[in-house]
Amino acid sequence: MEILATPAFWLSLTALTFLEIVLGIDNLLFVSIAIGKLKGKQQKDARRFGVWGAMVLRIIMLAGIFWIIQLDEHPLFHLPAALPEMLGMTEHVEEFIAFTVKDLILLGGGLFLLVKGTQEIHASVQGAHHEEAEAKNQFGDVLVQLAVINIVFSMDSVITAVGMTDMLPVMILAVVASTLVMAVAAEPLANYIEKHPTMKMLALAFILLVGVALVADGLGFHIPRGYLYFAIAFSLVVELLNIRSRSKAETAAGKH
């Protein structure tokens, strides 16, 4: 219990909880999109699975923290050196040709987000209520999608936790605290996205952006997350202003 009295514990907990919440926004957006076509109890169950499943998975990964740290140290295979040279990537040959378990998870998750985001945008443009689109969003399929994406985002979250502190209790408390915040925000966020179609399209664009970043990470080219969050925040502010402007115009039109 002495650790609770140290300033380092509370500073680390506050900073890491904030970062976990920021990292959890990506996950929360995907959960909101994935459960959008489910109804009633199925939607609530899928939301709980997406949010609380992420917390359980992250705690399990934290328990195997030393294995997580070693993922970058043991390449599974190498690509032929000629390939990056053909692509004009000679400056990053060493990073590009070595693939670890972490790289494969990030690469696979990024491609999954790109495919899923593209499919959802197509369904939104063509008509979200087509039978084919509905058939692809059954309860079991949604749970599988949430499980896959939880693995990807949990990896990112745990690696961030490892880089922030070496105190396991801080890591676990930060994950639990950020999950509680996401659990409270999940339903209002999903309802807001469903109410505003343009906001849903923006959320899908964010998912594509995160997918590109994960693919780049998997290939050894790290994109600083600050750039992504700035782009997302800027776009979000612009869209909120557009929504406010449209709302005022509709109110004014209704008075005439």
Image (cartoon, rainbow, N blue to C red):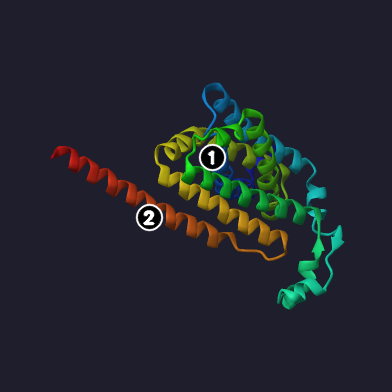
User: Where is mark 1, residue-wise?
Assistant: 33
Q: Seen in the image, is 243 located left or right of residue 36?
A: left
Pair 2/1: label in front = 1
Q: Residue 43 occupies which quadrant of the picture?
A: top right
Q: Residues within 10 Å of mark 1 (few under 14, many from 20)?
A: many
Classed neighbour count for the residue bearing mark 2: other residues with Cα under 10 Å, few (<14), some (14–19), many (≥20) = few
Q: Residue at x 59, y 43 (%)?
A: 27
Q: Report which residue position mark 2 lands on.
A: 238
Left or right, residue 69 beside residue 241: right
Cα distance between the residues tagged 2 and 1: 21 Å
Answer with the quarter of the image where residue 148 lies: top right
- Say what secondary structure mark 2 lies in: helix
Q: Residue at point 71% right, 47% down?
A: 167
Left or right? Give the position of 31 relative to 217.
Answer: left
User: Which is more toward the observer, 127 or 256?
Assistant: 127
- Residue 217 drawn at (x, y percent): 68, 60
Where residue 93 appears, as percent x and y from the top left, is 77, 73
Compared with residue 63, is residue 245 higher up or lower down, i.e. above or below? below
The answer to whether residue 245 of the structure is visible from this angle is yes
